[in-house]
Image (cartoon, helix red, strand yellow):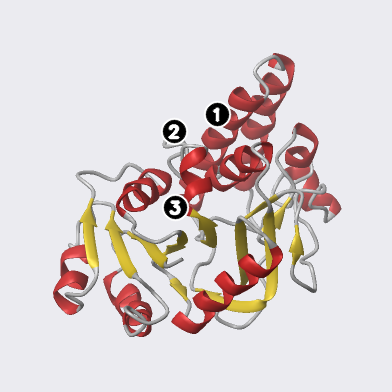
């Protein structure tokens, strides 16, 4: 039961090259293959990486259709029974990927997510409860969340051992059985960015799949919140994805969707206030 790594990249050649180098050494050993999906990078990131590492399977996207669509494109070409899905800004080594697979098989998990850390070694809260109007109202970057210092139950305490979770795990790095991923149709490509992981895990859970988290495997994620106008664009995209999520999973709760639209409008205004934490 082999492992296919599906890595998505966009305009990040220097960083992705550095992080890809140790992974390539695992091809034919811990890994069956590395599939690099480039989301139409203007700087030709994918072409450059293919030239540097001819052994990888390079799949260019004709245009940037978002993270989920890119992952689906790579997963459809994968040979392994297990998929290690990851961003191009994440540091993980072949032995760690093999360990994830061993932990998943030993626990009967269909999804196994590692502990993600910042470059400084701080844990990233990547285990979360599924979005609801209440959790969004008190989320840590909402007006009430900032004022009250609350996450509204959206963020979960990271388990201190390998165990199943009732919510979802972050989509930047996780291992999943290819069969299960395909059974639910993979990522919903209507999510361009953000919340696609919550939607996928919700559909997996509803299908009976077991979602696990393990702190035994620690990976570095070279990602941080941007500031200024770029951060505001990200916030708008997150709101767009959340609106679609609620329309999809709560089709009869029109009042909740109207309430969320008002909340998002307030949050964007709050976000612009001087001195607010981004």
Residue 85 % position (x, y): 46, 60
Task: Identify the disc placed on residue 92.
Answer: none
Instruction: State the residue in front, 91 or 258.
Output: 91
Q: CA distance from mark 1 to mark 2?
A: 8 Å
| Residue furthest right as drawn | 148
Point 23% across, 56% down: residue? 59
The residue sitting at 34% across, 59% down in the picture is 79
Mark 2, Cα crowd under 10 Å, few <14 / some 14-19 / many 20+, is some
Under tag 2, what secondary structure? loop
The answer to whether residue 117 is visible is: no
Foreground: 207 or 169? Answer: 207
- Numbered circle sitting on residue 190: 2
Residue 36 appears left or right of 157: left
Disc 3 to disc 1: CB gap under 8 Å: no
Foreground mark, 3 or 2, reads: 2
Name the quarter where the C terminus is drawn. bottom right
N-term-proximal mark, 1 vs 2: 2
Label 3 vs label 1: CA separation? Answer: 21 Å
Does any portion of residue 113 appear in the rendered image?
yes
Which residue corresponds to mark 1?
A: 244
Q: Nearer the viewer, residue 27 or 126?
A: 27
Tag 1's secondary structure? helix
Circle 3 sits in a helix, a strand or a loop, which is it?
helix
- Extreme-front residue of the structure: 1
* Residue in the image at 54% along x and 55% along y: 171
| Residue under numbered circle 3 | 230
Query: Where is residue 184 drawn, in percent x and y?
Result: 52, 37
Residue at 54% across / 62% down in the picture? Answer: 174
Looking at the image, residue 148 lies above or below residue 247: below
Q: Residues within 10 Å of mark 1 (few under 14, many from 20)?
A: some
Tell me, yes or no, whether the two marked residues, 1 and 2, touch with CB atoms within 8 Å: yes
């Amino acid at each position: 039961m082999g492992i296919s790594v599906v890595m998505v990249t966009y305009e990040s050649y220097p960083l992705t090259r550095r992080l890809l180098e140790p992974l390539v050494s695992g091809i034919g050993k811990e890994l069956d293959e590395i599939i690099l999906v480039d989301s139409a990078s203007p700087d030709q990131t994918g072409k450059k990486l293919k030239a540097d590492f001819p052994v990888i399977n390079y799949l260019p996207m004709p245009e940037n259709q978002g993270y989920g669509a890119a992952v689906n494109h790579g997963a459809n070409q994968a040979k392994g029974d297990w998929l290690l899905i990851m961003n191009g800004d994440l540091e993980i080594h072949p032995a760690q990927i093999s360990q994830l697979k061993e932990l998943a098989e030993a626990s009967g998990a269909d999804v196994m997510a590692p502990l993600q850390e910042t470059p400084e070694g701080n844990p990233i809260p990547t285990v979360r409860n599924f979005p609801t109007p209440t959790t969004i109202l008190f989320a840590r970057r909402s007006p009430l969340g900032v004022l009250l210092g609350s996450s509204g139950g959206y963020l979960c305490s990271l388990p201190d051992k390998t165990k199943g979770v009732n919510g979802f795990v972050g989509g930047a790095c996780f291992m999943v059985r290819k069969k299960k991923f395909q059974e639910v149709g993979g990522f919903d490509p209507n999510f361009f960015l953000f919340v696609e992981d919550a939607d996928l895990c919700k559909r997996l859970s509803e299908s009976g799949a077991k979602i696990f988290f393990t702190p035994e495997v620690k990976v570095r994620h070279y990602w941080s919140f941007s500031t200024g106008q770029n951060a505001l664009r990200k916030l708008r995209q997150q709101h767009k994805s959340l609106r679609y999520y609620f329309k999809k999973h709560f089709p009869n709760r029109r009042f909740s969707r109207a309430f969320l639209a008002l909340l998002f409008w307030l949050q964007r205004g709050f976000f612009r206030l001087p001195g607010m934490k981004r």
